[in-house]
Amino acid sequence: MECSKCQSQNPTKATYCGKCGNILVNSVESQDYNRNVKKISVFFFVLLAYIATINFIELNGNYIQTLLIDFIFAAIILVFYFIDTKSINKLIKFNKPKRLLLIKIIIFAPLFAILVSLIAGFLNQSIFDKSQITYYEQFIDSPAPIFFSILSIGLFPAIFEEIAFRGIVFNELTKITSIKSTIIISAILFTILHLSLLSTLWIFPIGLIFGYFRAKYRSLWYGIIGHFIYNSSIVLIEIIMYK
């Protein structure tokens, strides 16, 4: 094995260079590491660039436009999903559900949504001196405001964000780092993508919880269900407040 520092040759299984003491890295392992980092980086920055572009463009608030944005976001994720369907498909198979876990998710997700709504409302009023713009308002002129609100805010993110971060990103990270680090890093990337400093207070813990579910149960379904119930609860709370 050639030392990257002094270019001297060493035995294949050597850990350190016999001439300069430099740590030796297997070239195949190094190439795999770089390839995985590149996959994660490309995927994440494509999503980030799309979300950032949407945030900087002045939109007219039309519900059709909002749904189109959702579909494009989903399409980007599906492109990367189809590149490596085998590893993701293992995570979306229906296995025997953990009933107690599902009961806990069904109970605590709405409770957490209520807590977040109260905190977000308080912080927006006290820090920014303004009311929070509700997701429901985006669909008030649609044929079915509640249905489209749940579809856009509840269902789409639950499925596609979980595939993105607890599926694609998580799988690639496990190839180059520990499970604990994978859970933390994927939660950080998940938080960054939302482009909201204030929301970090609850998005990061949510990312950690869903990452833990993914790691322990080797399934995306608990994250998807929890994500859907939490987001849909936020929407329903806003609908009640809006009316």
Image: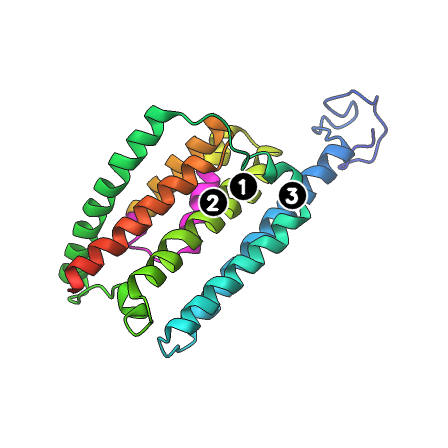
Counting other residues with Cα less than 10 Å from the Cα at mark 1, is it few (<14), some (14-19), or many (20 or more)? many
- Secondary-structure class at tag 1: helix
**Left-right relation of 132 to 161:** left
Segment tinted magenta in the rendering: 184-201
- The front one of 114 and 48 is 114
| Disc ID at residue 167 | 1
Question: In the figure, is residue 99 to the left or right of 92?
Answer: left
Task: Please check the rendered image and state whether residue 190 is part of the magenta-colored stretch, yes or no.
Answer: yes
Sort mark 3 into few (<14), some (14-19) or many (20+) by Cα contacts within 10 Å.
few
Q: Secondary structure at mark 2?
A: helix
Above or below 101: residue 89:
below
Q: Mark 1 and mark 2 in contact (Cβ < 8 Å)?
A: yes
Q: Earlier in the sequence, mark 3 or mark 1?
A: 3
Specify the quadrant that holds the N terminus.
Answer: top right
Could you say which disc has been placed on residue 162 in the image?
A: 2
**Image point (18%, 50%), residue name:** 119
- Toward the viewer: 105 or 27? 105
Residue labelled with disc 3: 85
Closer to the chain start, of discs 2 and 1, is 2
Q: Residue at x 26, y 52 (%)?
A: 234
